[in-house]
Image (tube, grey):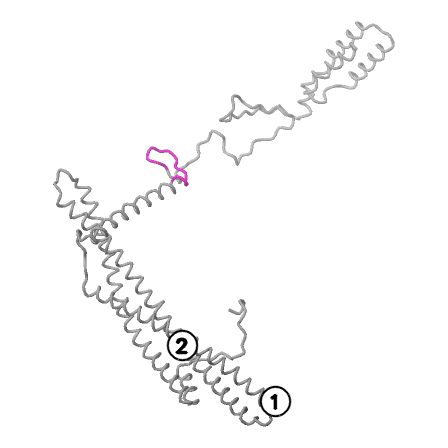
Amino acid sequence: MLLCLVIKDAGNSRRDKGLGETSHTVHAIMAGRDMVNGGGEVDTFEKDLKEILEDGPNLNDMHNTVQTGSPQKIMTSSYPGGSGSFDNTGSSQLPRSQTMPPATSHVSLSNNPTSSNGDFLPKTVQTAQSKIETIKSWSVNTFKCTKQYIAERLGKGSKTVDLELEAQIEVLRDMQRKYANILRLAKNLNSHFCNVVQTQRALGEAFSEQAQRSPELQEEFSYNCETQRALVKNGEVLLGAMNFFTSTINTLCNKTMEDTLLTVRQYEAARLEYDAYRNEMEALQLAPRESTSASKVDGSKRKFDEHKVKFEKLRADVSIKLKFLDENRVKVMHKQLLLFHNAVSAYFTGNDSALEATLKQFNIKLKPANTEKPSWIEQ
């Protein structure tokens, strides 16, 4: 047992030195083990073992020889969260990468935004601040416009009125309502006439079937069948003209006029903002000088000028769009009314050639009767 303890202590003291023991030391230990096992004196073995270890070569020198050079300098690096230093004393020590900056080096943050006191502001904080400012500006503007709207409704606030422009806008709104009614009636007529054509087609097929089954009435059924087929053919041509008419009226009413009315609504909103800031500026200018600061008056004047520019720009846009809308409306309706009149007249007078000529005149192409609905890929 004593021999094992001695060998264990010797091994622990030399473990970190790596490969330092010589061959004669190993032989001496093995010889000592044989002597003890053979019944020798323990004290004699301990004495011999101590002398062998003292006479052996220095293990530090052997370590230097294996490493072929002087030991590297121990590198220490301080970390911001640590309480001490980290010593790297391994036998296979790797140099620090030169691409990594030291932990204590100062990195330039000139490209990153900072606050007034020099603190770094994260991007999320800037976004939140911009949103808060936007909501604040919107809230103030909404409050002022609502206040102006209520004052106008109650007859207590002044309102900027352009009599000529307001009359044109009212005419446009009334015109859109009337054109929407024409569009609704034209769609109803188109739907009913489509049902008539389908009924005529079914009736013609029934006449044709009975002509084959009733030889005694074959002639009468046959020419009635041909009449219904002719009506179906002309009816499809008339349906093509009516579809073109309703499609054009729908574009004029729900797209062209609606676009102009959208600009009108923007103009009315700008007019309300303009009057709100105008009344606020006038109130500040009429107030006593000791109760209002010059900076407040200047800020109100600046906002009033901004809304004035916006209001005048939209007023000019509305005037131009109303003018172009009226010219376009007259041109489009002249063409569509002529088409509708010629197609209906030719159909009910049975003039097939005139009906076909009407479609060619307005470049209307009919879809074949038996065509299937295109797939979503073809669309």
Residue 132 quadrant: top left
Residue matched to label 1: 213
Does residue 327 appear left or right of residue 207 in this picture? left
As measured in the structure, the alpha-carbon distance from the residue carrying label 2 to the one carrying label 1 is: 36 Å
The magenta stretch is 114-125
Q: Residues within 10 Å of mark 2 (few under 14, many from 20)?
A: some
Residue nearest the viewer, comparing 324 with 30: 324
Q: Which mark is residue 189?
A: 2
Does residue 119 appear left or right of residue 56 in this picture? left
In the current view of this chain or complex, which residue is farthest to the right? 38
Main secondary-structure element of the magenta-colored stretch: loop
Q: The residue tagged with tag 1: helix, strand or loop? A: helix
- Residue at coordinates 31% horizontally, 68% vertically from top-left? 177
Task: Please state which amino acid type lies under the numbered disc 1.
Answer: Arg
Tell me if residue 180 comes above or below residue 76 in the rendering: below
Quick check: is 246 in the magenta stretch? no
| Residue 298 x, y percent position in the rendering | 19, 45
Mark nearer the N terminus (2 vs 1):
2
Quick check: is 115 in the magenta stretch? yes
Task: Please state which amino acid type lies under the numbered disc 2.
Answer: Leu
Q: The residue tagged with tag 2: helix, strand or loop? A: helix
Residue 254 quadrant: bottom left
Residue 133 quadrant: top left
Residue nearest the viewer, comparing 83 with 267: 267
